[in-house]
Amino acid sequence: MNASRIWPADLPSPPAPRAAPKGAFSTEEFLHSLFAGALAHDDPKAVQTLDRLCKKLDVTRKLRAFYTKDLSRNARPVADVQPSYLPLAVALLLSFAQAHGDLKFLNSALKVLDGNLTQRSLYPPELETWARSLVAELVK
């Protein structure tokens, strides 16, 4: 994945992910790996993991920093992702929606952009423009 394609140039890169508690899944590490290109769009495990994170977003309206390895429950300590990871999550969801033509990823990105998780002002306007173009492209 080309990070410059999904991340507005005027935004600083997301901070380093926090270390996960032993045996836990780190949402920040996963998103950072996708951003850095360590995981590819066509990696089935990456697609499956992002799909599970979509379910977390859709059901709980929260994106936690840590989950159990199978993403079935919050891991201790319970903490939300760092705020700067929310725009990154939206960019990655839009990127996966475009790459796979998958409305599930687009739907989750739109929910986040609508301010269900935090203030809309955190998101650069480029993400909303990209989301609108994907709606036009994928919803025919």
Image (cartoon, rainbow, N blue to C red):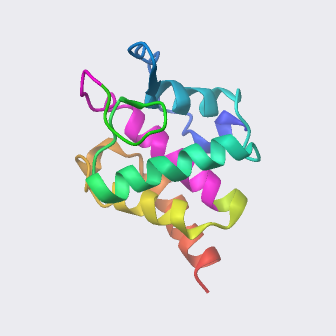
Residue 105 in percent (x, y) is at 53, 59
Residue at 65%, 26% in the rendered image: 36
Q: Which residues are magenta?
A: 76-97
Residue at 65%, 41% in the rendered image: 46
Location of residue 130 (image quadrant): bottom right
- Let me know if residue 74 is in the magenta part: no
Residue 86 in percent (x, y) is at 38, 40
> Looking at the image, which is closer to me, 71 or 62?
71
- Let me know if residue 94 is in the magenta part: yes
Relative to 31, say whether 18 is above or below. Answer: above
> Looking at the image, which is closer to me, 105 or 74?
74
Q: Quadrant of the N terminus?
A: top right
Residue at 33%, 31% in the rendered image: 81
Residue 44, can we see it?
yes
Residue at 40%, 43% in the rendered image: 72
Q: How many marks?
A: 0
Relative to 24, say whether 113 is above or below. Answer: below
